[in-house]
Amino acid sequence: MTNAMVGVADLTWPGLTNQDLREAADRLVHDRRDVPPGSVLRTFSRSVRAALLDGFLTSEVVAEAERRTRELLAQRPASGGRAPLRAWAGVRVPEVPRPRRSR
């Protein structure tokens, strides 16, 4: 039995550099100071992955991911508690009846 390599994927993506990704992430963090930097970076990371999976050219991935990130962050509710966040995520908040007041 021999160990032959069946298919080797080329993981180098010309046109997509770490420096381009870092500069785009820095711009997003700088522009959205009202959002925690970790949230901005997670959103950008997911946008990069989605752009790659959607088949964008590697030269277009950074611009598309930055556009998607800005769009997603614009939909983010203002910080003010859990109820708006749940509503934004599509989770219904159950209505709790208020007890009757005794007279």
Image (cartoon, rainbow, N blue to C red):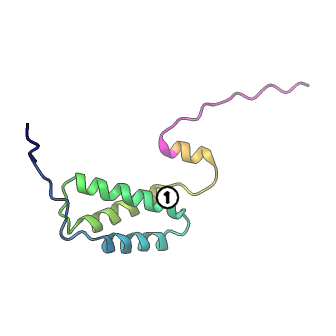
Locate residue 23, reporting x and y percent: 37, 75
Magenta stretch, main secondary structure class: loop
Q: Write down the residue under mark 1.
A: 39
10 Å crowding of disc 1: few (<14), some (14-19), many (20+) = few
**Quadrant of image for the N terminus:** top left
Q: Which residues, given as a range, are shown in magenta?
A: 88-103
Q: Quadrant of the C terminus?
A: top right
Does 28 sit above or below residue 98? below
Number of numbered discs on residues: 1
The residue lying toward the viewer, choosing from 44 and 5, is 5
Judging depth in this view, the residue of 17 and 73 nearest the camera is 17
Residue at the spot 31% in from the left edge and 73% down from the top edge: 20
Q: Is residue 94 magenta?
A: yes
| Residue in the picture at 63% in, 31% down | 95
What element does badge 1 sit on?
Answer: helix
Q: Is residue 86 above or below residue 64?
A: above
Question: Is 11 included in the stretch rendered in magenta?
Answer: no
Judged left or right of residue 29, residue 34 is right
Q: Position of residue 22 (x, y in %)?
A: 37, 71
* Direction from residue 66 to residue 7 in the image, left or right: left
The image quadrant that residue 12 belongs to is bottom left
Q: Residue at x 28, y 64 (%)?
A: 64
Determine the residue positioned at 56% across, 66% down: 34
Instruction: Answer with left or right where residue 3 lies relative to residue 70.
Output: left
Displayed quadrant of residue 45: bottom left
Residue farthest to the right? 103
> x and y percent of residue 70 in the render?
40, 63
Question: Is residue 26 positioned above or below 65 on the image?
Answer: below
| Residue type for callout 1 | Ser
